[in-house]
Image (spheres, coloured by chain):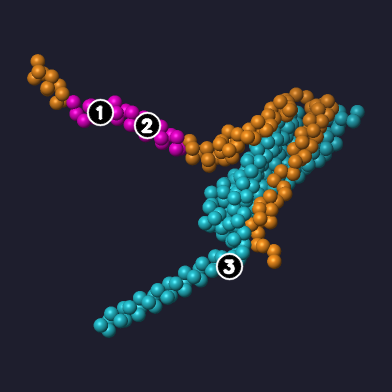
Amino acid sequence: MLNSRRLITLGLLATVVASVVFLTRVSADDSSMTDAQIVRIKASCTSAKTSLNQLRVSDALLRVNRGQMYDSMTSKLMSPFNSRVDSNNLNSKDLVSITNNYNTAFTTFSNDYQAYAEQLSSALNIDCQKEPVAFYDAVASSRTKRGQVHSDVVILHQYIDDYATAFGTFVSDNQQTIGVGK
Amino acid sequence: MDANKEATTVELGFWDQHRFLILIGLAIAVALVLVTISMALYSSSGAIQLDLSRPGYKAVTSQAANDESSFVDYPTSGKLDAKAINDFKTLYDTQAAKAKAVDAFGGDPLNPDTLSISAPQN
């Protein structure tokens, strides 16, 4: 009888402790989000998802068109010109260096876009009516990753300018050999 | 005559009797494995992100630029004289201006305020 009472008491105590731990964890997850915001997310769920879906499609088109343009800059202009400079036994070191950096930046751009697109897709797969906090976090993560893709684009533009500058320097350094300005 | 027929039937084992079905089953299994591998590669390589023929993207397929005609390849060989330099400069400046014309992925369309999922203002 005494053992049974002890068991029941222990069981109740364990239940209370488990409940406290569980409630603490739940409140920690939602600590940064108010109930009003959760209600707002649920209310805007459908329109937000429609916007995200449109963004996914328009960004995919942008990725294809800009990616093609950025790829052509190196495959059709920079690299062929570097080869031509090299085949004329002129120093193409700076031009090659910038081209290599550009190619690395382009690879980073592709990888970052892939990470962003995957994150956006996972955000779209979340049921924002049932999991508004997870949906908000997924959108926030997509936003960060999209910002990274934009930074990659800015870096690519910088390398395009750098190559033009290096080209100008190359021409002025080799005026005699190539006969520019005669 | 009947005895010979019976002897022949008995000699056929399980694999011999079902070899056609086994062949079909194996062909399907191999096809499934190959399709799984190719889909994994399609997804992990990033090719999926560039595929605008996927469902949901067909509306913008026609807007994908065909860059082949507008982007001229610069010749990799030949004498590097003033004309070659000027040709390259003209080509490069034109394409660089096009490449930089769009501030791609700028803006902030995923801002919680834009999507109306931010905390309500009191």
Disc 3 vs disc 1: which is toward the camera?
Answer: 3
**What secondary structure is marked by label 1?**
loop
Percent position of residue B111, x then y: 68, 54
Q: Which mark is residue A31?
A: 3
The quarter in which the N terminus of chain A is drawn is: bottom left
Label 2 packing within 10 angstroms: few (<14), some (14-19), many (20+): few
Q: Is residue B15 magenta?
A: yes
Which amino acid does the dot numbered 2 rest on?
Ile
Chain letter for the part of the structure drawn in orange: B
- Residue A97 visible from this viewpoint: no
Q: CA distance from mark 2 to mark 3?
A: 52 Å
Say what amino acid the circle numbered 1 marks: His
Quarter placement of the C terminus of chain A: top right
Determine if marks 2 and 3 fall on one subunit: no
Q: Nearer the viewer, residue A11 or B77?
A: A11
Which residue extends farthest top?
A: B1
Position of residue B58 measured from the top left corner of the image (x, y, whole percent): 60, 34
In the picture, residue A70 is in which quadrant?
A: top right
Which residue is pictured at 78% across the width and 24% down the height?
B79
Dominant secondary structure, magenta = helix
The residue at which mark 2 appears reads as: B28
The chain holding disc 3 is A
Question: Is residue B44 rendered magenta in the image?
Answer: no
Instruction: Look at the image and give the colour of chain A.
Output: cyan
The Cα atoms of the two marked residues, 3 and 1, are separated by: 64 Å
Residue nearer the viewer, A109 or A94: A109
Is residue A83 placed above or below A62 in the rendered structure? above
Residue B55: image x %, image y %?
Answer: 56, 36
User: Does B17 sit left or right of A114 as displayed?
Assistant: left
Highlighted range, magenta: B12-37
Question: Residue sitting at 46 percent across and 37 percent down?
Answer: B37
Above or below residue A24? Residue A165 is: above
